[in-house]
Image: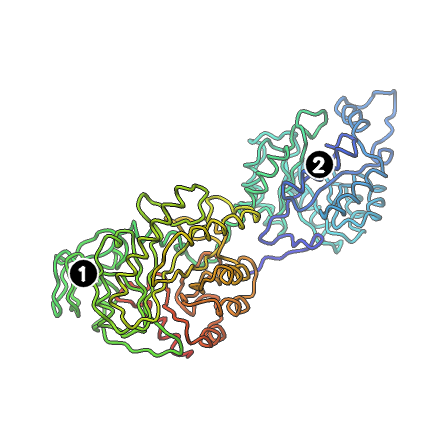
Amino acid sequence: MTEPTFNIGSFPVGGSRTFVIAEVGNNHNGNIELARQLVDASIAAGVDCVKFQIRNRAALYRSAPGEEGSEDLGVEYIQDLLNKVELTLDEHRDVREYCRERGILYICTPWDEPSVDVLADFDVPAIKLASADLTNIYLIRKAASLGKPLILSTGMSFEHEIVRAIDLVETLSVPFALLHCNSAYPAPESDINLGYIKRLKELHPFVGYSGHERGIAISIAAVALGATIIERHISLDRTMEGPDHAASLEPAEFKAMVEGIRQVEEALPWTGPGRFASQGELLNRENLAKSVIAKRPISVGETITEDALRVASPGQGLPPYRLPDLLGKIAHRDIRRGDFLYESDLVASAQRKRTYAFPVLWGVPVRYHDFRNYQDWVDPDLYEFHLSYRDLALKPANYLTQVDCRRLVVHAPELFENSELLDMTADDASYRQRSIDNLKRVVEATEEIRRFFPRADSALIVANIGGFSMDAPFPLSHRATLYDRFQQAYQAIDFGSTELTPQNMAPFPWHFGGQRHQNIFMMPDELASKAREFGLRLCLDLSHLQMTCHHFQLDFRAAVAKLMPVSAHLHVADALGVNGEGVVIGTGEVAWPETWKQVCAYPNVSFIPEVWQGHKDHGAGFWHALEFLTKLS
């Protein structure tokens, strides 16, 4: 269900992205140049809005009866500070114009009714009222008269006063938000009562947090509790004189808070119902979880009994809780000791020969050890061998027989000895050289495999050629260097009768069950341009492309149109969002009827169904995908 929102400027408040306000307040210390620097620092920190405060001192403060100095000491102190740190009205206009020039939203807190009239000429997108004015029904009405959204802090107040303020503003025909707040500078953690955000959300749908504590952890936690606005004071130096500096964040700290908030926003969404394993978890589940396996050989026709089964890693067959479901079933295949048991073993049907026909060349992914099984199951136009680095030490002749396939495709290992990924662009020159040497080994293996494919028109090597980074993308300016390194590495390899077809990558590729950032061989325009520049054809992975288009808000079908002319081979799979790679075809975001029509317009390309764990249960995922595509052809 979509959450309600209202706009401040063009920003939807109340949605999935937190509205972050840098409160300059009086931390400019009355210096217009310092005010501009604080605006610049706020922008650099990644905030959405910069906020100032404006006062008409004559309207704001009483003329105390009695002798000079008869106000309480705290009030005298505040008034003395304000004498030093306020900007003039012209300087406020200057700051407002500077924010406009810098492209950052500007809002302001008026402390009195004449200051509201001043802001009417500033064309502010919202009015923020301080905690001190939550009980000031006259200032609230005056601020609402501008017709702008209101943000009201709730520090120093009691719940009945908050409820009274809500009831008032609801009659004034302006959208508004409440900020949970503790008005101590700085506020002790034990007094913040952050959980009250949940109570505020019961009272009003738009709730945020205005923090005065030390550090950033509590403000980030507020987002996790449902705050959709975060306001923190910013200072260039917390040791400066003034009431707010000590409770402020310096620029680097403010930037870290914004980054933390954005991380929490990524982590918060839950689509429900229930819990589902993420793509990274599924990768690790495959490697770390347990399955039902055969404890001893089970012959076709034999009744499966408990003594024939046991539980062991990895998690690629039926999970352990399905073991009782197998008991009493009749085996419809010969099951070797150590074989996984699958869903198909629960039903009485044997594997059958399958036939498919497409306007383009088609095939299935295989490993050496299951190649002969697939020969029994299908007669494809090609096989795509997915190699591990250990396979490079094996002799293909021990596993393969000659076939009449029209094409051979070999997928290079993604992981080599010592847990090294293939990266032909690595900063470390020795790492690049090892990647070159490893790809040469793949070329040698492909040449050996090709002996069993005498009719093949080509021997394509699919490789993820690198260009990834660990914690953040590289600067855009670094891409040219990465492509130069790739080209040099590519030219250092004699591919013989084989052909390198680099695979396009998704923005966040999975490595070792975790994610990294991809930097090259990802963007459609760049892919098409580099393929032509380097004289290469691509392996176009539709799942990776869909995730790229989703993340960068690109037109998927337009991207397919650009890349099909430079593609030799396709990995056909569906995708959801930026993490749902290779989901069951037809359950993701790819518009298949239109996309498949685009693919079939290129009869010389080939494809395999690249479905996540499609090989399990004797290729069940592959058969589903091929049958789905048959209906579209």
Q: Which mark is residue 356?
A: none
Instruction: Looking at the picture, tell me which residue is in the foreground, 138 or 599.
Output: 599
Examine the rendering and report whether any part of residue 258 can be seen. yes
* Residue 497 rendering spot, x and y as whole percentages: 34, 63
Q: Residue at x 37, y 68 (%)?
A: 609
Q: Residue 225 occupies which quadrant of the picture?
A: top right
- Say the numbered circle drawn on residue 398: 1
The residue that mark 2 highlights is 38
Of the residues shown, which amino acid type is indicated by label 1?
Asn
Q: Considering only vertical position in the picture, is 397 above or below 115?
A: below
Lower position in the chain sequence, tag 2 or tag 1: 2
Residue shown at 75% from the left, 50% from the top: 125
**Relative to 71, 484 lies left or right:** left
- Compared to residue 37, the image places residue 364 above or below, namely below
Q: Quarter of the image containing the N terminus?
A: bottom right
Residue 541 visible within the image: no
